[in-house]
Amino acid sequence: MKKLLLGVILTITLTTTVYGASYIFNDANSTLYVNGSKVNCNPVTYNNTTYLPLRTVAETLGAEVGYNNTTKQIDINTVNTQKLAESCVMLFSEKGTEGHQGSGVYIDYGKILSCDHVTNGNTKHFTSDKLDLTLDKSNSTLDASILDSPNKDIKPVKIGDSDEVKVGDKVILITSPKGEKNKITYANVLERYPNGEKEILLWGKIDNGSSGGACFNMQGELVGILANGLDGSDLCAMIPINDIRKEL
């Protein structure tokens, strides 16, 4: 995530690089080119400085722009969350007439990570597109499990380092709450390992079906999965990916 203010001094042509892409602003005809393609924008000149529309430039470069009306903060996220969502799934796990709906994420080719309380004790596992899965391994103490998928073509996500997650960090959540596949939301890290538990506490509301959902840092790396939410609050718990890698 980067915060960005773009300003161009009049009477010059500026060439620079943002997010790995080149942009050129020519004040003579008020045109903006991104990677050689013309982009429509409406520059504003103030005190002999020309300012480019932040959202136009950022979104043209593939970034997501968010605005918090309470804090008056503009956030620019360079992570392609839609691309991350392609590696996430909605899961169903059943035994007889009972079952659970949860979430999962591909951590390797043909391997889906989810929560043990979603999968354990059930005999049938499948995704929302009816892809049959088999339980590979699970750890009830950690509340994590790995499922084998016959689809070996889905690209797994990049694994991050959950030890680097700090209080105050923002994380990206991709979950399937209440049957809504791969919903993208955000949360903030509140506390690491509260009361000695193997969880990281997040401030971010989740609904039923989010268990096993992916938690990414702002570089798009998987740093954990959602374990549960606390009833009546916006608190939820994340199982750190480093602990999962040690145990599974």
Image (cartoon, rainbow, N blue to C red):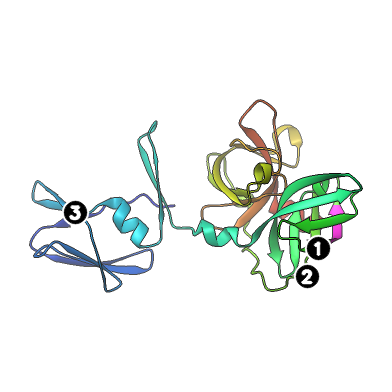
Coordinates of residue 98 in the picture (x, y in percent): 87, 43
Which structural element holds mark 2?
A: loop
Residue identifier under label 3: 42
Magenta segment includes 58: no
Query: Which residue occupies 67% across, 49% down?
Result: 213
1 and 2 marks in contact (CB < 8 Å): yes
How far separated are the C-alphas under marks 1 and 2?
A: 7 Å
- Which is more N-terminal, label 1 or label 3? 3
Q: Compare marks 3 and 2 and give the one earlier in the sequence.
A: 3
Residue named by callout 1 = 132
What's the magenta region? Answer: 134-138
Local packing at callout 1 (Cα closer than 10 Å; few below 14, some 14-19, many 20+) is: some
In the rendered view, does 239 fall on the left or right side of 14? right
Q: Nearer the viewer, residue 50 or 101?
A: 101
Residues 7 and 95: in front is: 95
Q: Quadrant of residue 247?
A: bottom right
Q: Main SS type for the magenta part?
A: strand
Mark 3 Cα shell of 10 Å, populated few (<14), some (14-19), many (≥20): few
Residue type, label 2: Pro
Secondary structure type for disc 1: strand
Q: Position of residue 165 (x, y in %)?
A: 59, 48
The answer to whether mark 3 and mark 2 are in CB contact below 8 A is no
Mark 3 and mark 2: span between their CA atoms?
A: 50 Å
Q: Quadrant of residue 117?
A: top right
Q: Which residue is mark 2?
A: 150
Crowding at mark 2 (Cα within 10 Å: few <14, some 14-19, many 20+): few
